Amino acid sequence: MSPIFFLRGRAVAAALALALAGCVSSPAPAPTFWTGFRDHPQGYLNAGAAPDASRFLPPPPTAGSLRDQDDVALYRAARALKGTPRWDQARADNEIETPAAPRVFDEALGIRFEPARMPTLTRLLGRMLGDLETVQTPAKRGFFRPRPFVTEPAETCFPPEPWLANSGSYPSGHAALGWAWALVLAEMAPDRADAVLARGLAYGDSRMICGVHYASDVEAGRLVGAALVAALKANPAFQADFSIARDELEAARLEAAR
């Protein structure tokens, strides 16, 4: 055998060994996520396949009606919660756009929600917000109910940004997404369904406590959330991601139980 050929063979073998070693030892790249509203992922549903909340929701309570009076009374009464843990929780529940927003279900699920460990689940829940915008926007714009702190200025649990005052109060998007997330997570972890659903309801109630929605806005939001989940159940892409996301959640729960 030629010495040159032998040396070349050894060099190729060494390079191949280094490459294989690099493949084994190099950690997988961390998943990347969005940072806020500007780069938020789009939903699963196109406008033609998405429900239209303006078509199935009843109109908000008429000003001065008994239901409207109840809404106002609850809004006023909730101002007394300032300084309590529930007020603080309502402030924290304002988070909705970030990849870590579903951490509100940590206690209910019995794990810490870590996007990097559950990338498919994180994106699935994030994309649901994109779908919610498609479903609820016609109703928000069509009904355009003024928010409580606009009609009757009072302290809210966080300083409202200017755009919030110009956004319709009915239905509540937070209540819709909180309930939709709860329905999906309860199906993925049926043994924790009661706690998950209770947390989803509380997430919506936080909007009334904060003073940025009326109670009837929150209730309408839950109808929107249920309609959203029903539509997603018929979407093949969502169902494919759901299966992977459920496995991710189950693995995280098994690891947490060790």
Image (cartoon, rainbow, N blue to C red):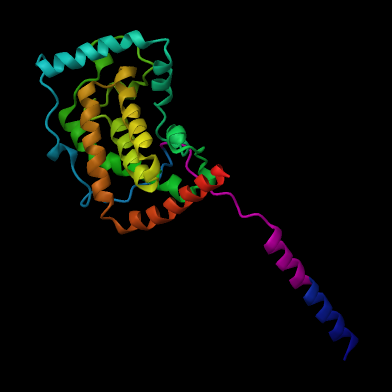
Q: Give the side of residue 97 with respect to residue 141, left or right.
A: right
Most foreground residue, 75 or 19? 75
Q: Residue furthest bottom?
A: 1
Give the quarter of the image for residue 80: top left
Q: Answer above or below: position of 11 versus 5.
A: above
The residue drawn where x is 54% and y is 47% is 117
Indicate the quadrant containing the C terminus: top left, top right, bottom left or bottom right: top right
Q: Position of residue 158 (x, y in %)?
A: 40, 17
Q: Answer above or below: position of 96 versus 28.
A: above
Indicate the quadrant containing the N terminus: top left, top right, bottom left or bottom right: bottom right
Q: Give the side of residue 199 with respect to residue 71, left or right.
A: right
The residue drawn where x is 83% and y is 78% is 10
Give the quarter of the image for residue 38: top left
Residue 52 appears in the picture as rendered? yes
Most foreground residue, 3 or 25? 25
Q: Answer above or below: position of 131 versus 82.
A: below
The residue drawn where x is 24% and y is 10% is 152
Residue 32 appears in the picture as rendered? no
Give the quarter of the image for residue 192: top left
Magenta span covers which residues?
Answer: 15-37
Question: Any magenta on residue 124?
Answer: no
